[in-house]
Image (cartoon, rainbow, N blue to C red):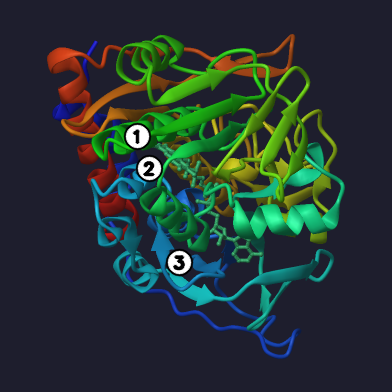
Amino acid sequence: MAISRRDALKYTTVLAASATLPGYASMQFEQPITKNLDRKNIKVIVVGGGWSGLSIAKNLKAFSPTTDVILVEQKDQFVSCPMSNLWLVDRVDLEFLTHDYLQAARNNNYTFFQATATGMDKSKKILFTTNGNLHYDYIVFAPGIDYDYSFITDNPELEKRLRQEYPAGFKPGSEHLTLKKKIHDFKGGNFIMTVPAGNYRCLPAPYERACLVADFFKSKKLDAKVLLLDENNDITIKEHGFHTAFDELYSDYLEYHPNSTIENIDLDEKIVETEFKEFSFDDASFYPHVKGAKILETVGIAKDTVFNKLEGNINGLTYEVIGHNDIYISGDARPMGFSKSGNTASTEGLFVAKLIANKINGIVNTPWQSPTTLCFSAVTMSPERAIFVNSMYAYNKEKKRFGFATPKTSEVWKGEEGLTNAKAQHDWAIAMYRYMFEN
Ligand SMILES: Cc1cc2nc3c(=O)[nH]c(=O)nc-3n(C[C@H](O)[C@H](O)[C@H](O)COP(=O)(O)OP(=O)(O)OC[C@H]3O[C@@H](n4cnc5c(N)ncnc54)[C@H](O)[C@@H]3O)c2cc1C
């Protein structure tokens, strides 16, 4: 089933429900720590200006106009991971991916505070940042992911080299710039990319990237191959769409190797060892396992889980940290098994904003609402053709687990369907950027 432009926009209109934005509420930052405790407005800090944090800040301000909302983000501009695979192969430019935090804050009446969160005092309700300390009544951590290289190596020297010379490109910024240069400078031979196990960020993105890079090498008529080493036993999502693309479009340019758990990487000899095989490479990008971002561990709200050792210990239905009902975790840093994707983080952010606004207004039992996963993947560059998955989640009380409730996919990239999906992918991104940065 293809998705039309109207449908793509319809999926995102759920997000735009919080339309009327209120007047500006003033902010005051505490420096030093304990001043201004007789403030009259409730103060909410959102740590992390990604897809989740931007949605929370905007919607909280819309739901609770008199609340002071401060978005604490370490970067001075937003660069989108969604659509970045198309940027790697020159189908969109960097300007399309890059957006202005100040504009988002002005348009939606919250305060952008550029700083890195470094710690907190939970009993005094103070967040420590590189730019001063902030008092809060409620705080949400939406800091995204960090990499966990321990599944590849326990050698710090090798980890340092992997981070610097062979970055994953699953966090925006310099990693993406390095990766793009590698792809564009590649002269031929094997280009290794990897897929980790666990609930890694954006399940389809490594397969989308493999398709686009193979297509790019093909367009340059290089004697080159993408070797995609997957720790999983098969493609983890939209498998029909990606398998058919691998087989029918890229058999000369892409080799897919499932069950490829990395046992050793020799960067000097340029060899990757897995349990059964060795692969030599000319260049590479290694995607390690992921975990909730470091700040969760620093402030002591992280917990061991099976795959993601440092993700937050929260109530999956209320997003509150267990034992601290004034602290929330949202977005890719959450421990629930939702897809770690932008649309999921953004729709979830709308619900978290509602939870907090309700709590501020004395409503404590807000029924759980599912986030929505809508994730497009391009499979060819020219013309652009894409596939997608779209689903909400259901909570299984007995198993205490979430699973896809309404999965809908379009995995046919051939013909009109693939072209329509590609158009919808662009329309979705435009609608989401507008939603986050305009009012
Ligand atoms: C290549 C690629 C393609 C993708 N494609 C899609 C797609 O097509 N569709 C889709 O829906 N999703 C896609 N995703 C996934 C999507 O990007 C993520 O799921 C989404 O960014 C998660 O949002 P988040 O708010 O949880 O985290 P992020 O967007 O990573 O935001 C976290 C923010 O917190 C900040 N931060 C972290 N620590 C601190 C601190 N201590 N102090 C201050 N700030 C801090 C970071 O700087 C960052 O800005 C893709 C991802 C990648 C990498």
Residue 66: name its quadrant. Answer: bottom left
Which mark is on residue 403? none
Residue type indicated by callout 2: Asn
Reading the image, the residue beneath label 3 is 66
Position in image of residue 270 (x %, y %): 66, 43
SS type, badge 3: loop
- Ligand 1 within 8 Å, label 2 CB: yes
Reading the image, the residue beneath label 2 is 85
Q: Earlier in the sequence, mark 1 or mark 2?
A: 2
Q: Which of marks 1 and 2 is in front?
A: 1
**Camera-side residue: 144 or 156?**
156
Q: Which of marks 2 and 3 is in front?
A: 2
**Label 1 – label 2 distance at C-alpha:** 7 Å
SS type, badge 2: helix
Q: Residues within 10 Å of mark 2 (few under 14, many from 20)?
A: many
Q: Can residue 4 be seen in this view?
A: yes
249 is higher (above) or lower (below) than 44: above
Q: Is residue 59 visible?
A: no
| Circles 1, 2 touching at the beta carbon (< 8 Å) | yes
Reading the image, the residue beneath label 1 is 212
Residue type indicated by callout 3: Thr
SS type, badge 1: helix
Which residue is drawn at the image coordinates 38% and 37% (left, top)?
213
312 is higher (above) or lower (below) than 190: below
**Camera-side residue: 407 or 29?**
407
Residue type indicated by callout 1: Leu
Q: Is residue 105 left or right of residue 416?
A: right
Residue 402: name its quadrant. Answer: top right
Position in image of residue 229 (x %, y %): 60, 27
Q: Which of marks 3 and 1 is in front?
A: 1
Residue 110: name its quadrant. Answer: bottom left
